[in-house]
């Protein structure tokens, strides 16, 4: 069958118009997921629209394209109440602005990341986990992290090494059998796989997670006896500033044979300060510590 030149041109124009109309029916939806109280971005929040899923980026921003004129939107994040918006009308480019999620008091204090390298509810963790909060460290007036190890159930401190449930803490030539993490990064010395406890800033600790079991499948041979993950405080939109002072005085013992000083009771004092604030895309976290121990 032969077509005239006019017919061919007409067909091409019609196909072009169809393709253009198809392109213009595609709508773009974007927004940002934040905490309703602190205004902090919720990184990698789950965004579900109709039957599709996507995730927000590290800054809480999300963006997706749809061909529909209305969508059902659900935004969820562990520890927060799911945000639901049904039959949302959209056209062309739609910026939903900042979507604020409310915290869920039933789950926000019971999350962990050490057991699987991602956030999950502690009741869903299949291994034995212990979680220490900052107030526990403050009540014990801890200035070195190794001083708190023996106060963790199932953990002992022997010859500068952490032991979990009586396992071997250190093997010469292989290093520590208990992996020490600082913000999910190995904190063992690279030459001998030996933890240097004095390098850990206790004043910046926000949480300590202890996995009492072999974590070698996730973290390697250094985690055969368990994992101690030290999570530091991170910057928020509102500035955080705190100063803490301490003073310790040793009284004379009832048994004079245990008195090791000649004159004047031993004492020590010191202070620590910490400051954290988010400045644009920069997170500023700093601290200072001083201790005077003359006796």
Image (spheres, grey):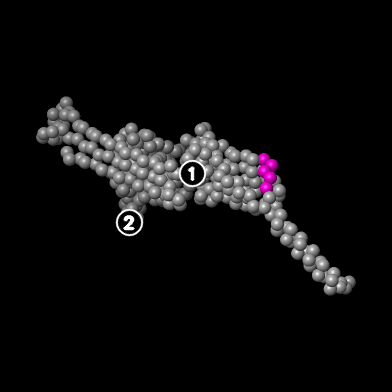
Q: CA distance from mark 1 to mark 2?
A: 38 Å
- Indicate the quadrant where residue 162 lies: top left
Q: Is residue 269 left or right of residue 14?
A: left
- Quadrant in which the C terminus is drawn: top left
In this orientation, which residue lies closer to the viewer: 126 or 137? 137
Q: Are marks 1 and 2 in contact (CB under 8 Å)?
A: no
Instruction: Please give the name of the residue rendered at 84% of the width and 71% of the height, measured from the top-left corner.
Output: 6
Q: Residues within 10 Å of mark 1 (few under 14, many from 20)?
A: some
Q: Position of residue 195 (x, y in %)?
A: 33, 48
Classify 1 as above or below 266. Answer: below
- Circle 2 is placed at which residue position? 191
Q: Tell me where the magenta segment starts and ends, as one range.
A: 86-90
Residue 269 is a magenta residue = no
Classify 283 as above or below 8. Answer: above
In this orientation, which residue lies closer to the viewer: 19 or 107? 19
Residue 40: mark in rendering: 1
Q: Is residue 259 left or right of residue 196?
A: left
Q: Main secondary structure of the magenta part?
A: strand
Instruction: Please give the name of the residue rendered at 39% of the width and 49% of the height, measured from the top-left corner.
Output: 284
Regarding residue 167, the answer to whether it shows in the image is: no
């Amino acid at each position: 069958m032969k077509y005239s030149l006019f017919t061919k041109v007409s067909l091409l124009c019609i196909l072009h118009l169809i393709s253009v109309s198809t392109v213009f029916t595609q709508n773009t939806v974007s927004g940002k997921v934040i905490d309703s109280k602190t205004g902090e971005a919720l990184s990698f929040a789950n965004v579900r629209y109709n039957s599709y899923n996507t995730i927000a980026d590290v800054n809480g921003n999300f963006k997706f394209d749809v061909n529909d004129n209305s969508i059902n939107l659900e935004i969820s994040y562990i520890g927060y109440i799911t945000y639901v918006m049904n039959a949302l009308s959209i056209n062309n480019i739609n910026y939903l602005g900042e979507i604020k999620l409310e915290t869920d008091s039933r789950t926000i204090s019971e999350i962990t990341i050490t057991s699987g390298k991602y956030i999950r509810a502690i009741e869903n963790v299949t291994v034995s986990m212990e979680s220490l909060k900052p107030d526990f460290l403050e009540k014990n007036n801890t200035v070195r992290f190794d001083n708190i190890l023996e106060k963790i159930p199932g953990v002992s401190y022997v010859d500068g090494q952490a032991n979990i449930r009586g396992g071997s803490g250190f093997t010469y030539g292989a290093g520590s059998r208990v992996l020490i993490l600082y913000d999910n990064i190995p904190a063992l010395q690279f030459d001998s796989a030996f933890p240097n406890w004095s390098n850990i800033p206790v004043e910046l600790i926000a949480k300590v997670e202890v996995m009492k079991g072999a974590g070698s499948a996730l973290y390697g041979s250094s985690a055969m006896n368990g994992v101690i993950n030290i999570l530091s405080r991170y910057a928020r939109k509102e500035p955080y500033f705190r100063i803490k002072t301490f003073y310790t005085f040793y009284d004379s013992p009832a048994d004079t044979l245990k008195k090791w000083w000649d004159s004047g009771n031993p004492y020590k004092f010191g202070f620590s300060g910490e400051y954290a604030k988010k400045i644009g895309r920069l997170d500023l976290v700093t601290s200072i510590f001083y201790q005077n121990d003359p006796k």
